[in-house]
Image (tube, grey):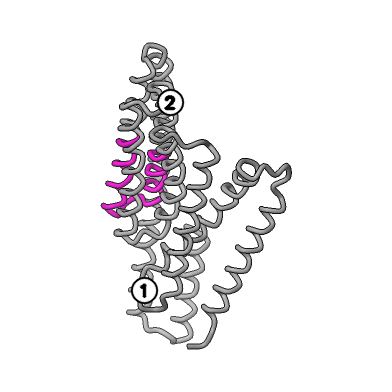
């Protein structure tokens, strides 16, 4: 029996002794607490089982890769990584839709996105930049994050839209690198523009007031975009701007983040 459950049962006993609640109500509360305790225990057991299964799967996957990876060419490796990423993401989405094992479903979706990113990066070894195959495969790098962001927003998921957006910047960078003649500095400027535009849209949604009901995911996505900004500011300062020390640019972005946070708190706590 957990400490929390002991505290609840002791509180029920005190309320019964003090005649705050009658015996029938106390019995119902004890029964509800007992059912809740059993559900928590079952959920913990499920997570332990899922973690054990994941460990076994990782070991099996490692053995398979050690055996099969050297025998595959770069094209087969790219397809294997992409297929595995799609499968893992699909399993995570299925678990989320069923409303079960939410942390595991989120972890699977993030792992799937990571595998897809790895596949797109690895594709550089399979096909030359701006070749037909690279352009087709790179074009699909825009479809994956767009579909994932749209689905997570539609499901009113509070966590995943922001993470998918941050990953989407990586997918966009890969698409621009594989399918266009843009230089590395130009790609960074495009990513900067996309980040600024998305942050402005999210800020507008957050300032829409009570008539907008999606503030949970929008707020988390806004925070994630500000965090991604630190990476892009560093890349922009050391890349296109050629700054030896990017700390001044990072300090400016940090000041912006703090200012927006203070403004947001002021608006949120202001009387209607």
Location of residue 83 (image quadrant): top left
Left or right: where does residue 14 sit relative to residue 100?
Answer: right
Vertical comparison of 56 with 45: above or below: above
The residue under the point 35% across, 57% down is 39
Q: CA distance from mark 2 to mark 1?
A: 42 Å
The residue under the point 35% across, 52% down is 149
Vertical comparison of 13 with 99: above or below: below
Find residue 86 and report its horizontal and vertical position in percent. Answer: 31, 36
Q: Identify the mark nearer the N-term, 2 or 1.
A: 2
Find residue 251 and report its horizontal and vertical position in percent. Answer: 69, 57
Q: Which mark is residue 91?
A: none
Does the magenta portion include 115?
A: no
Main secondary structure found in the magenta portion: helix
Location of residue 40 (image quadrant): bottom left
Vertical comparison of 85 with 38: above or below: above
**In front of the other: label 2 or label 1?**
2
- Start and end of the magenta stretch? 85-113
**Of the pair 70 and 50, the residue shown nearer to us:** 70
- Say if mark 2 contacts mark 1, CB within 8 Å: no
Name the element at disc 2. helix
Q: Which mark is residue 124?
A: 2
Left or right: where does residue 231 sit relative to residue 60?
Answer: right
- Which residue is identified by label 1? 212
Q: Is residue 162 visible?
A: yes
């Amino acid at each position: 029996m957990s400490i929390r459950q002991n505290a609840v049962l002791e509180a029920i006993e005190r309320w019964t002794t003090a005649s705050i609640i009658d015996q029938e109500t106390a019995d119902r509360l004890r029964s509800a607490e007992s059912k809740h305790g059993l559900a928590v225990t079952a959920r913990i057991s499920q997570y332990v089982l899922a973690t054990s299964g994941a460990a076994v799967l990782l070991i099996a996957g490692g053995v398979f890769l050690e055996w099969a990876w050297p025998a595959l060419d770069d094209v087969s490796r790219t397809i294997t990584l992409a297929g595995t990423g799609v499968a893992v993401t699909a399993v995570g989405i299925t678990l989320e839709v069923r409303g079960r094992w939410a942390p595991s479903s989120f972890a699977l979706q993030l792992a799937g996105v990571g595998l897809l990113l790895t596949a797109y990066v690895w594709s550089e070894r399979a096909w030359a930049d701006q070749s037909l195959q690279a352009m087709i495969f790179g074009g699909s790098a825009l479809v994956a994050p767009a579909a994932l962001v749209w689905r997570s927003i539609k499901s009113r998921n509070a966590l995943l839209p922001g993470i998918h957006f941050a990953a989407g910047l990586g997918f966009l960078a890969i698409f621009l690198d594989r399918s266009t003649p843009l230089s590395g500095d130009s790609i960074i400027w495009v990513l900067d523009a996309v980040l600024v535009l998305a942050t402005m849209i999210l800020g507008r949604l957050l300032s829409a007031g009570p008539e907008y009901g999606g503030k949970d995911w929008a707020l988390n996505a806004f925070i994630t975009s500000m965090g991604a900004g630190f990476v892009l500011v560093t890349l922009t300062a050391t890349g296109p701007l050629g700054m030896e020390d990017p700390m001044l640019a990072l300090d400016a972005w940090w000041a912006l983040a703090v200012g927006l946070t203070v403004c947001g708190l002021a608006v949120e706590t202001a009387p209607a």
